[in-house]
Amino acid sequence: PLLAQADWWRAVGPEAAELPPTGLAQPTLTARLAPGVTRALPGRTADVLLAAAATALAATPGLLGVTAAATVLVDVEGHGRLDPGRPLNLDRTVGWFTTVYPVAVTLGADFAATLADATTALRQTPDGGLGYRLLAQQGAIPERRPPLLVNYHGDIGAAGLPAGWNLSDWPVGTTVSPANPPDHALTLTAALAHGGLDLRLDYAAPVTADAARNYLDALAATLTRAAEADATGQAAPSVTPADLARPDGPASPPAFPTPPPGLDGLDAATLAALNALAEGGPA
């Protein structure tokens, strides 16, 4: 039942800072990471992007007052691709399906620890965040105002297009009215395209232009270092205690509040060994 998730959502990062925007959206900033970066992060770009987005907040002095070892609250946007497990009548529905829900990421001693925490937090989110906004709109839980939203579109490059087609770099003009009030002080949109990872950062007061540019630079540097660590075998494992909590998929915190005995104290090195065994490689 949806109401059974209310206590779980109330416990998501209660101490994390919130930052409602206080002005209109400012000119968009963009960056593109080289193909080598994205090839080094196969199958888990969304996890790495979330961890890097949270890490970059602490690496940008004075941006939001975030420091190392803090818990960062980030809104994650999904695109309605989850299977609800039951048929839905969409005959009278028009529009883009989306979910927006908060995820608490604890900044660890290094990026590997932060990535493991971000991955676990995503895996443990009940129903992929589908119920959060419904509960908030009904007043069953408070609506959070994270400073940052992360929206990963996935691979929208030539691999998913018919032969001979590719995405254009030509400008398309303004897609959202400048008078439309933003929901977040920082909004990060990312997609695999043009052979690399395209990053787009929208920002609004109280974030300044210099702070936004410094944040985007810190994010790109964090993602590049993560790819380099992955290429040299120093990256965080792709298996976390949340993955091992049950055989049929991610655990839901109300039913599985902690990993089973023996898994809650595993460090990154042990998890890396378990991951290698699961993939048939050496421990």
Image (cartoon, helix red, strand yellow):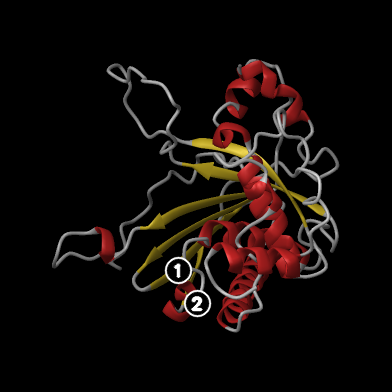
Of the 4 image quadrants, the one containing the N terminus is top right
Q: Are there few (<14), some (14-19), or many (20+) residues within 10 Å of tag 1?
A: many
User: Callout 1, which amino acid?
Assistant: Leu
Q: Position of residue 50 (x, y in %)?
A: 62, 56
Of the numbered discs in the image, which one, if any, rests on residue 147? none
In the figure, residue 156 lies in which quadrant? bottom left
Residue at the image position 49 percent from the left and 53 percent from the top: 152
Callouts 2 and 1 close, C-beta under 8 Å? yes
Q: Is 143 above or below relative to 23? A: above
Q: Provide the residue designation for mark 2.
A: 37
> Is residue 21 something one can see in this rendering?
no
Residue 21 in the image: state x and y as whole percent: 67, 44
How far apart, in angstroms, are the residues tagged by discs 2 and 1? 8 Å
Give the residue displayed 42% in from the left and 45% down from the top.
176
Q: Secondary structure at mark 2?
A: helix
Q: Against 276, is 161 above or below?
A: above
Q: Residues within 10 Å of mark 2 (few under 14, many from 20)?
A: many
